Image (cartoon, grey):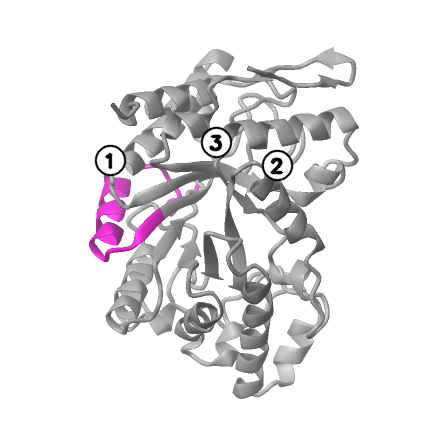
Amino acid sequence: MLVLSVLFGVAVGAVPSPGLRDLTHGRLYVGSAVNYGYLTGTGNGGSMSPAEVSNYTAVITGEFNIITAENALKMKQTEPARGVFNFTEGDAIVKLAAAHNITVRGHNLVWCAHNPMWVPPFSKTATEAEMDGAMKAHITGVAAHYRGQVYSWDVVNEGIVDVPKVHSCSNWTCALKGKDHMPRGDDAVDWTKAGIDYIPNAFRYTANVDPTAKLFYNEYSIHNLTPKFDYVLMMLRDLVAAKVPVHGIGIQMHVDNTSPAKVWNATAFRIVLDKFAALGLEIHITELNVPYDDPMYHGLTPAGKLAAQARLYSDILSLCLATPTCKSFETWGFTDARNSFGPNLASPGAFYYDDHYQSKPVRAMVATTLKNQLPRPL
């Protein structure tokens, strides 16, 4: 058991032994998003003490055999000015992973959000060829730098609209995010300006630079039987048929029972897994979380909330393990102290460890599920 540091003068928990990574026996990736700011003592929620940074790092190295850079490999960080690359944050995460035999998922190369501020004005006047050239140059620069250091890339992230504008069309290109369906924010970019075929082109460009990396499309609101799922499935079916080098699907798994598209339904999720598996694609659960105030907790005692959280994460893992092509199970953070929802989440929180880095029932039940469904090889 790895004992964690003292946090704000209070003795905190320990990373249980064996770690989750040890319970997979090399047959599943289990991991989390990792934030560069938290590894260096800055980031969402303000500065962190050296003891807390130590705790944050100890959980990563003790529990996981795969990690995803939450922001460090996005375009805003890696190409802050056109043609000028900065790999400081990404290199730090890759170095940590290499030192502890942890695999890295590259997240992401092309996304309509979180772009550097030079791209939106450039995109307003650029020709299709110029936009495609900028996309290709970015992919080439980043994928070449990390060639051989990442297991996979989320080549394109979140390219399909939530509610396709043409429900009855027979081509998935009708559901691409474009100028009429963009996220809010000054960093939003319409990559369809690089051509309606920018997605297959992005996969081809990445494969040309790093032919050993597995290439994924990553999306939210596809763990249920939604119109968005239908269009993503249609797109991937067409890409596979056209021999575009797409190797996997990232199911983000942001469960939110206030949203019809994000509700948890085990039967629907089993169908989703089967349909993606039928395409021959590797499946990764990439960003699992559920809000601490989700309706599934309403009316439950504090202990009941923790138990419900544990059952949900265990049920999702169990269905992944029952699907031979589901190879990775990642949460979008691992501690209620520091994560994308905000610092120091109220109980039951959302992750394996509470805001004092004490492991929670959800961690114990995930460990039990791994033990039961991935027994030690004889």
For disc 1, the neighbor class at 10 Å (few under 14, some 14 to 19, many from 20) is few
User: Three-letter amino acid code at disc 2?
Assistant: Asn
Q: Is residue 57 left or right of residue 25?
A: right
Q: Is residue 205 left or right of residue 355?
A: left
Identify the residue under disc 1: 322
Camera-nearest residue between 184 and 316: 316
Q: Is residue 327 left or right of residue 134?
A: left
Q: Position of residue 190 (x, y in %)?
A: 54, 72
- Of the numbered discs 2 and 3, the one sitting upstream in the chain is 3
User: Three-letter amino acid code at disc 3?
Assistant: Asp
Height in image: 39 above or below 351? below
Camera-nearest residue between 268 and 132: 132
Q: Disc 2, disc 3: CB below 8 Å? A: no
Identify the residue under disc 2: 339
Q: Which residues are magenta?
A: 256-283
- Name the quarter where the C terminus is drawn: top left
The structure residue drawn at horizontal position 60% and vertical position 63%, both measured from the top left corner, is: 145
Residue 294 bears which disc, if any? 3
Q: Position of residue 257 (x, y in %)?
A: 41, 37
Q: Secondary structure at mark 2?
A: loop
The structure residue drawn at horizontal position 71% and vertical position 42%, both measured from the top left corner, is: 37
Q: Is residue 257 visible?
A: no
Camera-nearest residue between 265 and 362: 362
User: Three-letter amino acid code at disc 1?
Assistant: Ala
Q: Position of residue 93 (x, y in %)?
A: 63, 45
Q: Secondary structure at mark 1?
A: loop
Height in image: 196 above or below 89? below
As measured in the structure, the alpha-carbon distance from the residue carrying label 2 to the one carrying label 1 is: 29 Å
- Of the numbered discs 1 and 3, the one sitting upstream in the chain is 3
